[in-house]
C-alpha cells in the first residue's frame, strides 16, 4: 500500500512518464488497499493455478488489468445507477455466485437497458497489470520473473515464487490457496438443461438463476439450438451419484504426511538443506559450493511447491466430501464432448483423482462373482499396464497374481514398491482393494468401482467408418479379431522400410504412438518431431536434426500406406474447407448424427508489439478493430483447414456417446472417448456402443452431408466397402 501511495504521489506531481498515464487516469478513485488486495489475489491465483500457462507474465498482467477494470466497473454501476445495482444484487447475487458470474449478470442486466461501460483497451489493461505486478514483486519479494528459451529459441517468461516465499511457505500457504471461486460438486441433484421457446433453460447449479458463469456449450455464441438427444445425455450424466473412495484417501493422507510422491500425487516435500560449513567465512570455495547447493535446494522447493498445488487441492476436495454422496454438473464443448464443470473429484482428473472416487449406487457382486469378477479383474490388469492383452489373458494374469493383489490390497503403504511403478498406480491400487474384498476374501457383497473401457485410436475408428476403409478398420478393432489389433505397431513396422538399416531399430510402437494417435487430429510435423524426439530420448537416443526429419517423414509415409482412407479423408476436408472460406464462407457449421450443431469460428488475429519496462518487448495478440473499436471478423482459411477435420471427428465420437446411453439405466460417466460404468453393467454398455457405431455409419454418409454444407466441388473419398455391422462382433472395439 505504501508503494502504491508513493507511485500515485509521483503521478500527481509529474514525476512519472507517459507510460503510466493510464494508471493516473483509471485508478485514482481506487483506494491503495483495494488495489493491493486485487493484485495480490490475482497474482496468487495465476502463479499457483493448476492450468498450464496461467503463470506466463503476459497472462498474469492481463488478468490483473481485467480484475482492476471489473472493480472500477462495479463502482461506476453503483455510483451512476444505485437503484438498479441494488435490485440486481438482491435478486441475482448470492453466496454461490463468483466474481466472474456476478460481472456477467450485471453486464447483461445493464446491457438490456442500454447502459454500457466504456471498456478499457487491451493496452490499458496490460499497463495497469504491469503496474500491479511490479508493486507485488518490489514490496513482497515473493515473486520473480523466470525466463527460459525453448527449442525454437523463443523466450517463455513466467512469474514464479522466490526463495523468500519458499522459506515462508508454511506461513503463507493459506494466502497461496486464495484461489478464485472453485466450482464444487453438488450435494443435491443438479437442474436439468433444456430449451423453452427457443432459449436455453439453464441447468447445473440449482441456485444459479442465470448460470452466466457456466454455459451449456463452452466457447459458443449460446444461440444455437442443439438436439434433444445430446441434452438428454448431459442430464443423465448429472444424475449420477458419486462417493469418495475412503481407502484411497487414507493411503494418500499417509503419503501426504511423509511427503511421498507417487505418480502425479505430489505433496509438499522440502528438499535437504546442507548445513553451512563451519569454516565457510574463511574458505571462499567451500562457501561458494554451499551457496550453490542451497540455491539448488531452494529452486527444487519452488518447483515442488508449484507442482503440489493440484494435489493439495485434490486432498482438500476429497476431505471436504469424505462422507458425502455428491453429483457433478456437466456442460458441452462446442463439438459436443461432455466435461464436468467442477475441476476436482471428477472422472476427468489425474490417475490419483480418478482413483479417489467411485459410484455411490453400488451393485451386488453375486454369489460367484460371475461377470462382476471378470470385469473387476479386467480393471486390475488394465491399470497394471496390460491394455493390449486379450480379456482372457488379463483375467488369467489376475488369477496368477493373487498374492500381489492381496499384498497391495492389505497393505498398500508397506508394499508400495509392488505398485508405484505400474501404468496407473492409484487406480491399480484401488482396483486391487476392490477385487480382493469382492472376489478373494468375499467380505464385500457390492461394488461401486468405476471400470473403464477405451476406444482403440478413436480418430482412426471414426475415419475408417467415414471412408468405409476395411483395412484401417481392422487395425483399430472395428472388425472382429481374436486379440486386440495394434495400429501403432503396424505403422512402426511399415516405417522401417523408409529408413536406413542403422535407424530401423529405433522404430517401435512406443516411438510412433503419439504421432499416430494425433495425426487424425491434424498434428503438425513440428509436434510429431517433438513426440518422436521424446520417445527416442527415453531409449537414450539423441537423433541429429536431419535424422529426426527422416524418421518423421517415414512415419507419415507409413501412415499413407497403412491407413490410406483416413489420410485421404483428412486431405479432402482440408482442401474443400479452405476453398469454402476463400470463396466467402465466414464459419464452418455442421450437424452431428444426434442433432448437435457445431459452429466453428476461426478468425485472423493481428499481432502488435508493445514495449513494457518490466520485460522489454512483449508480443500481444489483439483482434483487428475498425475506427469505432469494433472487432473485424476476418475468417482465417489456414486455421479452418487445420482444425475442421479433428473437430469433425470429435463431434462424431461425441455423437456415439450421446446415443449409446439412451437405453442404459445404470450409473456411468465418460472421459472423451472412454466410458466408465460398474463391473456388472459393462456387458450391456459394450453392446450399446457397438450398436450405436453401426447405426451411425449405416444411416447416412456423413462426409457427403458435410461436403454439401461447404459446397465441396468433389465427392468425398470413399475408398472401400466396409460394412459397419461387423463391429457388433468385435470384442476389442471398446476395451
Image (cartoon, grey):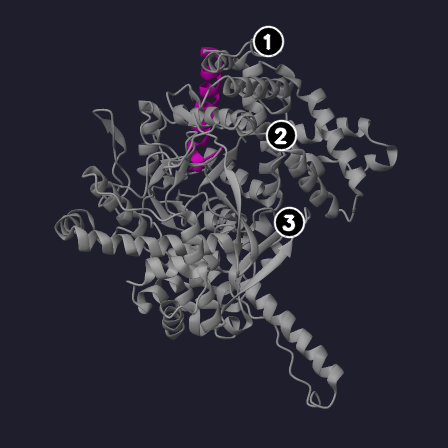
Q: Of the residues under marks 1 and 3, which one precedes in the sequence?
A: 3
- For the residue carrying disc 1, how many other residues have a C-alpha within 10 Å: few (<14), some (14-19), or many (20+)? few
Q: Which residue is mark 3?
A: 154
- The residue where tag 2 is placed is 519
N-term mark: 1 or 2: 2
Residue closer to the observer: 233 or 117? 117
The secondary structure making up most of the magenta span is helix
Residue 171's image quarter?
A: bottom left
Q: Quadrant of the C terminus?
A: top right
Give the image location of residue 684, x and y in percent.
43, 27
Q: Is residue 206 left or right of residue 237?
A: left
Query: Disc 1 designates what residue?
Result: 721
Label 2 packing within 10 angstroms: few (<14), some (14-19), many (20+): many
Residue range in magenta is 673-699
Q: Position of residue 444 (x, y in %)?
A: 41, 48
Nearest to the eye among marks 1 and 2: give it. 2
Question: Disc 3 and disc 2: Cα gap in Å?
Answer: 25 Å
The answer to whether residue 260 shows anywhere in this view is no
In this rendered view, identify the residue nearer to me: 273 or 130: 130
Q: Secondary structure at mark 2?
A: helix
Q: CA distance from mark 1 to mark 2?
A: 23 Å
181 to 641, vertically: above or below: below
Amino acid at each position: 500500500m505504501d508503494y502504491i501511495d508513493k507511485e500515485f504521489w509521483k503521478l500527481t506531481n509529474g514525476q512519472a512518464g507517459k507510460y503510466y498515464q493510464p494508471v493516473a487516469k483509471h485508478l485514482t478513485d481506487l483506494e491503495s488497499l483495494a488495489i493491493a488486495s486485487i493484485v495480490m489475489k490475482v497474482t496468487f491465483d495465476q502463479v499457483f493455478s493448476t492450468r498450464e500457462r496461467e503463470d506466463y507474465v503476459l497472462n498474469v498482467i492481463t488478468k490483473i488489468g481485467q480484475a482492476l477494470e471489473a472493480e472500477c466497473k462495479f463502482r461506476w454501476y453503483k455510483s451512476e445507477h444505485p437503484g438498479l445495482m441494488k435490485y440486481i444484487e438482491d435478486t441475482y447475487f448470492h453466496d454461490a455466485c463468483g466474481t466472474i458470474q456476478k460481472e456477467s449478470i450485471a453486464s447483461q442486466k445493464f446491457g438490456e437497458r442500454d447502459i454500457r461501460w466504456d471498456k478499457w483497451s487491451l493496452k490499458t489493461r496490460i499497463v495497469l497489470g504491469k503496474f500491479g505486478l511490479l508493486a507485488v514483486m518490489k514490496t513482497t519479494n515473493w515473486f520473480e520473473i523466470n525466463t527460459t528459451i525453448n527449442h525454437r529459441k523463443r523466450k517463455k517468461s513466467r512469474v514464479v515464487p522466490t526463495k523468500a516465499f519458499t522459506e515462508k511457505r508454511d506461513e503463507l500457504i493459506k494466502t497461496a490457496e486464495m484461489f478464485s471461486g472453485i466450482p464444487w460438486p453438488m450435494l443435491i441433484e443438479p437442474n436439468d438443461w433444456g430449451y423453452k421457446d427457443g432459449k436455453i433453460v439453464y441447468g447445473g447449479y440449482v441456485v444459479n438463476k442465470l448460470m452466466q458463469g457456466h454455459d451449456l456449450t463452452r466457447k459458443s455464441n449460446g444461440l444455437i439450438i442443439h438436439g434433444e438427444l445430446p441434452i438428454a445425455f448431459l442430464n443423465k450424466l448429472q444424475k449420477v451419484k458419486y462417493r469418495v473412495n475412503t481407502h484411497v484417501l487414507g493411503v494418500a493422507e499417509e503419503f501426504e504426511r511423509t511427503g511421498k510422491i507417487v505418480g502425479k500425487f505430489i505433496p509438499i516435500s522440502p528438499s535437504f538443506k546442507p548445513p553451512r560449513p563451519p569454516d565457510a567465512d574463511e574458505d571462499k570455495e567451500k562457501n561458494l559450493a554451499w551457496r550453490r547447493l542451497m540455491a539448488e535446494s531452494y529452486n527444487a522447493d519452488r518447483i515442488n511447491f508449484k507442482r503440489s498445488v493440484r494435489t493439495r487441492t485434490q486432498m482438500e476436495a476429497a476431505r471436504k466430501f469424505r462422507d458425502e454422496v455428491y453429483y457433478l454438473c456437466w456442460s458441452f464443448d462446442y463439438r459436443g464432448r461432455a466435461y464436468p464443470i467442477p475441476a476436482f473429484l471428477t472422472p476427468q482428473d489425474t490417475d490419483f483423482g480418478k482413483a479417489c472416487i467411485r459410484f455411490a449406487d453400488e451393485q451386488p457382486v453375486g454369489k460367484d462373482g460371475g461377470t462382476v469378477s471378470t470385469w473387476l479383474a479386467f480393471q486390475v490388469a488394465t491399470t497394471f499396464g496390460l491394455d493390449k492383452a486379450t480379456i482372457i489373458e488379463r483375467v488369467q494374469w489376475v488369477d496368477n497374481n493373487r498374492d500381489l493383489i492381496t499384498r497391495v490390497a492389505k497393505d498398500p503403504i508397506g508394499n508400495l514398491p509392488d505398485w508405484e511403478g505400474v501404468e496407473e498406480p492409484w487406480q491399480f491400487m484401488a482396483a486391487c482393494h476392490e477385487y480382493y474384498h469382492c472376489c478373494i476374501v468375499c467380505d464385500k457383497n457390492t461394488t461401486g468401482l468405476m471400470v473403464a473401457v477405451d476406444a482403440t485410436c478413436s480418430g482412426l475408428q471414426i475415419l475408417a467408418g467415414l471412408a468405409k476403409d476395411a483395412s484401417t478398420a481392422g487395425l483399430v478393432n472395428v472388425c472382429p479379431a481374436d486379440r486386440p489389433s495394434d495400429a501403432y505397431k503396424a505403422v512402426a513396422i511399415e516405417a522401417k522400410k523408409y529408413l536406413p538399416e542403422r535407424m530401423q531399430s529405433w522404430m517401435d510402437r512406443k516411438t510412433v504412438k503419439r504421432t499416430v494417435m494425433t495425426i487424425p487430429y491434424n498434428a503438425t510435423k513440428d509436434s510429431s518431431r517433438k513426440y518422436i524426439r521424446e520417445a527416442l530420448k527415453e531409449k537414450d537416443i539423441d537423433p541429429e536434426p536431419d535424422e529426426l526429419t527422416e524418421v518423421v517423414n517415414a512415419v507419415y509415409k507409413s501412415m499413407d500406406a497403412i491407413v490410406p482412407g483416413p489420410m485421404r479423408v483428412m486431405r479432402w476436408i482440408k482442401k474443400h474447407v479452405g476453398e469454402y472460406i476463400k470463396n466467402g464462407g465466414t464459419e464452418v457449421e455442421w450437424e452431428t448424427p444426434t442433432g448437435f450443431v457445431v459452429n466453428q469460428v476461426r478468425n485472423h488475429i493481428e499481432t502488435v508489439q508493445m514495449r513494457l519496462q518490466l520485460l522489454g518487448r512483449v508480443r500481444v495478440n489483439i483482434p483487428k478493430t475498425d475506427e469505432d473499436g469494433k472487432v473485424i471478423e476476418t475468417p482465417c482459411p489456414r486455421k479452418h483447414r487445420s482444425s475442421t477435420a479433428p473437430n469433425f471427428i470429435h463431434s462424431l465420437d461425441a455423437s456415439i456417446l450421446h446415443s449409446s446411453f439412451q437405453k442404459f439405466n445404470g450409473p456411468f460417466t465418460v472421459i472423451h472417448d472412454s466410458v466408465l460404468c460398474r463391473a456388472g453393467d459393462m456387458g450391456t454398455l459394450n453392446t450399446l456402443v457397438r450398436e450405436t457405431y453401426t447405426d451411425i455409419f449405416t444411416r447416412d454418409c456423413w462426409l457427403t452431408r458435410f461436403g454439401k454444407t461447404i459446397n465441396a466441388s468433389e465427392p468425398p473419398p470413399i475408398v472401400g466397402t466396409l460394412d459397419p455391422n461387423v463391429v457388433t462382433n468385435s470384442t476389442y472395439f471398446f476395451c
